[in-house]
């Protein structure tokens, strides 16, 4: 006698993307075994932000960069990162050069 046929577990995953003046945090339900890329597609976020190019954009889960084929787990927050406008190291160096020098008198 065979028992009930096991079914895939349903996962809840959030997909996040933010611009300076607009952001989205969408919740999707998907079957266990789904990937980061599938969560992004299923969320519909690409329709809301057509400028997202998944062939170039970096993605992550809770701040850690991952690939689009990384499996998601229940409760994950998938993040789509915008490209940097300026290199943070160069920007800091330029700010330091523009700032007035302070004397080290005590």
Image (cartoon, grey):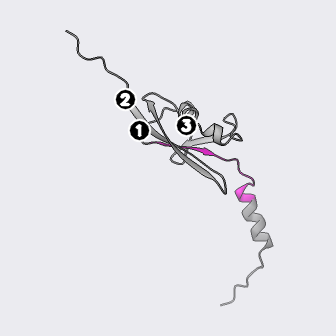
Task: In the rendered structure, find residue 74 and report the number of the disc placed on it.
Answer: 1
**62 up-or-down from 34: above or below:** below
Mark 3 crowdedness (10 Å alpha carbons): few <14, some 14-19, many ≥20: many
Q: Is residue 37 above or below residue 106?
A: above
What secondary structure is marked by label 2? Answer: loop
Q: Which residues are magenta?
A: 76-90
Return the residue found at the far top.
1
Front: mark 2 or 3: 3
Q: Are marks 1 and 3 in contact (CB under 8 Å)?
A: no
Residue at 61 percent across and 43 percent down: it is 80
Q: Where residue 35 appears, x then y in whole percent?
A: 51, 31
Q: CA distance from mark 1 to mark 3?
A: 15 Å
Which residue corresponds to mark 2?
A: 9
Q: In 3D space, how far apart are the residues under numbered discs 2 and 1 (Cα atoms)?
A: 9 Å
Give the residue number, with chain letter if any, for mark 3. 43
SS class, disc 3: helix
Please say whether residue 87 is one of the residues in the magenta stretch.
Answer: yes
**What x and y, as percent, mark residue 36?**
54, 34
Residue pushed farthest left? Answer: 1
In the picture, which quadrant includes the C terminus?
bottom right
Specify whether residue 89 is painted magenta. Answer: yes
Please report contact status of discs 2 and 1: CB closer than 8 Å, yes or no.
yes
Q: Earlier in the sequence, mark 2 or mark 1?
A: 2
In x, y percent, where is residue 93? 75, 64
**Residue drawn at point x = 66 percent, y = 52 percent:** 19
Crowd class of label 1 (few under 14; some 14 to 19; many from 20; radius 10 Å): some
Q: Position of residue 55 (x, y in %)?
A: 69, 33
């Amino acid at each position: 006698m065979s028992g009930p046929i096991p079914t895939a577990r349903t996962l809840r995953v959030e997909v996040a993307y933010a611009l300076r003046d607009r952001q989205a945090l969408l919740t999707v339900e998907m079957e266990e075994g789904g990937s980061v890329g599938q969560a992004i597609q299923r969320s519909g976020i690409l329709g809301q932000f057509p400028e997202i190019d998944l062939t170039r954009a970096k993605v992550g889960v809770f701040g850690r960069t991952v690939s689009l084929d990384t499996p998601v787990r229940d409760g994950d927050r998938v993040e789509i990162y915008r490209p940097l406008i300026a290199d943070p190291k160069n920007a800091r160096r330029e700010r330091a050069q523009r700032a007035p020098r302070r004397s080290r008198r005590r």
